[in-house]
Image (tube, grey):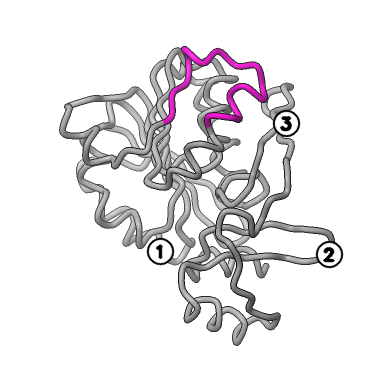
Amino acid sequence: MIASALWDEGTNGVAEVGDELLAGFESRDGADAAVRAHGGAVEAVDPTTWAQQETASVAIGGTEVTLEVGTAFGHGGHPTTALVLDTLATEAQRSPLMTVLDVGCGTGVLSLAAAVRGATAVVGVDIDPAAVAIAERNIGRNDLDPGLISFATTAIADIAERAARFDLVVANILLAEIRPLAPSIVACVGDRLILSGSLVEQRDELIRLFPTLAVVGESQADGWLCLILST
């Protein structure tokens, strides 16, 4: 699946527009490498407009959630997002979700899903202000209580420094991005952690980043992995 490969190669956004697959990269070198591997062409565009699709719909527990996508990750179609959505459903059946932290929230799809599944308070953070702006608009787009969900352009380290703990932490980000964040993520986990964004063959390395947590569940799709870890 080309889209999956592009995420692993460092794209900062993928969108299907008509019969074309568009991928954004921070550098020309990254885009050129993707073209060499998969074909296509490179075009320099305004990064705020390259993928203005656009909305996507995701069914969550019988509720249709509509997302503005733009250049942010999280339209519900990527295997890692689908894995986490399924895992959130399982966790909600196990016990009430209560407080949830969504690390690297993108469009906010996982934060919105947690709210739909009954979480009492959801915080989504991303270092990309454009993604946070999209996520905030998606709250209103779905008539969800803005007092229930909040998004912020904040590093996870800042939250960890405030000694904030959440019943459930969700991090759907690539392994390369997880590595430096792992200690801060652990500091925020009150009960359980859902991890996705890593390939199946990266499982052992991913687990080694969280030596104080135990693996209590896992699932796979299209070569991607989702783990549930517990304190």
Q: Which residue is drawn at 52% across and 25% down?
A: 114
Q: Which of marks 2 and 3 is nearer the N terminus?
A: 2
* Residue named by callout 3: 59
Q: Position of residue 49 (x, y in %)?
A: 63, 55
Name which of mark 1 and mark 3 comes first in the sequence.
3
Q: Residue at x 67, y 22 (%)?
A: 142
Q: What element carries label 2?
A: loop
Label 2 close to label 1 by CB (< 8 Å) = no
Is disc 1 placed on a helix, strand or loop? helix
Q: Is residue 134 above or below residue 205?
A: above
Task: From the image, tell me which residue sits under label 2.
Answer: 19
Q: Name the residue under label 1.
A: 202
Residue nearer the viewer, 210 or 22: 22
Q: Which of marks 2 and 1 is in front?
A: 2
Q: Which of marks 2 and 1 is nearer the N terminus?
A: 2
Q: In which quarter of the image is residue 46?
A: bottom right
34 vs 194: above or below: below
Q: Is residue 116 left or right of residue 161?
A: right
Q: Distance between the residues labelled 2 and 1?
A: 32 Å
Name the quadrant containing residue 167. top left
Give the residue drawn at x 56%, y 37%: 134
> Residue furthest toward the front?
46
Q: 204 or 44, which lies in front?
A: 44
Res. 68 image quadrant: top right
Mark 1 residue type: Gln
Mark number for residue 106? Answer: none
How far is mark 2 from mark 3, CA to CA? 23 Å
Residue visible at 70% across and 80% down?
A: 40
Label 1 to label 3: alpha-carbon separation: 29 Å
Magenta residues, start to end? 136-151
